[in-house]
């Protein structure tokens, strides 16, 4: 039974994951090598807890779990039943973490990676007892989005997948088991197909960024939030899908590299919210309110989708 969890890495996702797991009654120790990251995570907890309260996510009968922060990796994994690796998307960095915990955890401790798309089979090559490694891909922001992908690699024991699936379900979240270990898993494969086409349309001058955002948010996104893509096929009619896809598929973006528009912005260090400028420009001091407004809207949408209005 999983009761104690260690989270290794406190970047964008770590604080929200820790808070949601603790709200589910689990005891969490959260680690980062950078003291500044630990302090940012600690200071973010109040806001995150407020979001969980707004979503009316109650602790179990036994009460909420605890969250403890540390800068010592041995301290972080001591006594853990599950270790969630949440370090940057680089196999070398992840392998270094696996080596660091190798002698600190028992052979039966499950090691889950929150990788956004590195195949779990590749990561298993860097850990002993690969049968206990599994993908546990949260969606950002993790304390609001209830869906979590669960992915087994070639050497993952099916029981490891089942244990993580059941854990997710036990704290009121939605596990989605990905049956094959493909790059990007499922959520990001679908998302990046959409992003590739969106960037291509903007780069070709077909549409302005703000207009494609309106098109997707109030057209595709509004609909798909209620009717998923496979159900949408039935709603539209498979004959209609065949008719349109027979000519449209051949004209969709199929590039395998990164669009020049994106590369130019990266070269200019205009990376998005983190730099104050990306596709859009963000006035100084406006980003916190933008993030708060988006969180409020996501909360409202989730409540409606759950039938709580």
Image: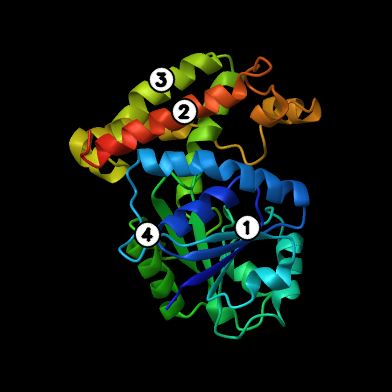
| Residue 72 can be seen, yes or no | yes
Q: Position of residue 149 (x, y in %)?
A: 44, 57
Q: Secondary structure at mark 3?
A: helix
The residues bearing labels 2 and 4 have C-alpha atoms spaced at a distance of 24 Å
Q: CA distance from mark 1 to mark 3?
A: 33 Å
Residue 74 x/y as whole percent:
72, 73
Q: Position of residue 128 (x, y in %)?
A: 66, 82
Along the line of sight, the residue nearer the viewer: 51 or 97: 51
Report helix, strand or loop for mark 2.
helix
How far is disc 4 from disc 1 in space, using C-alphas? 18 Å
Instruction: Please name whichever residue, 300 or 36, is drawn nearer the observer in this view of the structure.
Output: 36
In the rendered structure, find residue 175 and report the number of the disc placed on it: 4
Q: Residue at x 74, y 61 (%)?
A: 71
Dot label at residue 215: 3
Disc 3 from disc 4: Cα separation:
29 Å
Q: Which residue is mark 2?
A: 294
> In the rendered image, is residue 253 in sight?
no
């Amino acid at each position: 039974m999983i009761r104690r969890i260690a989270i290794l890495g406190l970047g964008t996702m770590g604080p929200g994951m820790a808070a949601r797991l603790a709200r589910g009654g689990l005891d969490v120790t959260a680690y980062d090598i950078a003291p500044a990251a630990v302090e940012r995570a600690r200071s973010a907890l109040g806001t995150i807890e407020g979001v969980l309260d707004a979503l009316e996510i109650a602790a179990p009968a036994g009460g909420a779990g605890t969250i403890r922060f540390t800068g010592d990796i041995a301290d972080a994994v001591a006594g853990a039943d599950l270790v969630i690796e949440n370090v940057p998307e680089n196999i070398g960095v992840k392998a270094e973490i696996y080596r660091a915990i190798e002698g600190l955890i028992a052979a039966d401790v499950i090691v889950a990676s929150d990788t956004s798309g590195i195949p779990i089979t590749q990561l298993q090559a860097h850990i002993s007892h690969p049968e206990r490694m599994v993908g546990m891909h949260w969606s950002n922001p993790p304390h609001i989005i209830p869906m979590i992908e669960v992915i087994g690699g070639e050497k993952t024991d099916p029981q490891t997948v089942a244990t993580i699936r059941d854990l997710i379900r036990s704290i009121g979240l939605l596990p989605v088991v990905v049956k094959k270990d493909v790059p990007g898993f499922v959520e990001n494969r679908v998302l990046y197909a959409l992003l590739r086409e969106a960037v291509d349309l903007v780069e070709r001058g077909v549409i302005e960024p703000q207009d494609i955002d309106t098109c997707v948010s109030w057209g595709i996104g509004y609909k798909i939030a209620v009717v998923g893509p496979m159900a949408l096929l039935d709603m539209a009619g498979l004959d209609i899908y065949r008719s349109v896809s027979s000519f449209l598929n051949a004209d969709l973006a199929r590039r395998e590299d990164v669009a020049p528009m994106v590369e130019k912005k990266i070269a200019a260090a205009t990376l998005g919210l983190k730099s104050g400028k990306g596709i859009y420009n963000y006035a100084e001091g406006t980003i916190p309110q933008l993030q708060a407004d988006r969180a409020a809207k996501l909360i409202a949408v989730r409540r409606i989708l759950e039938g709580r209005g």
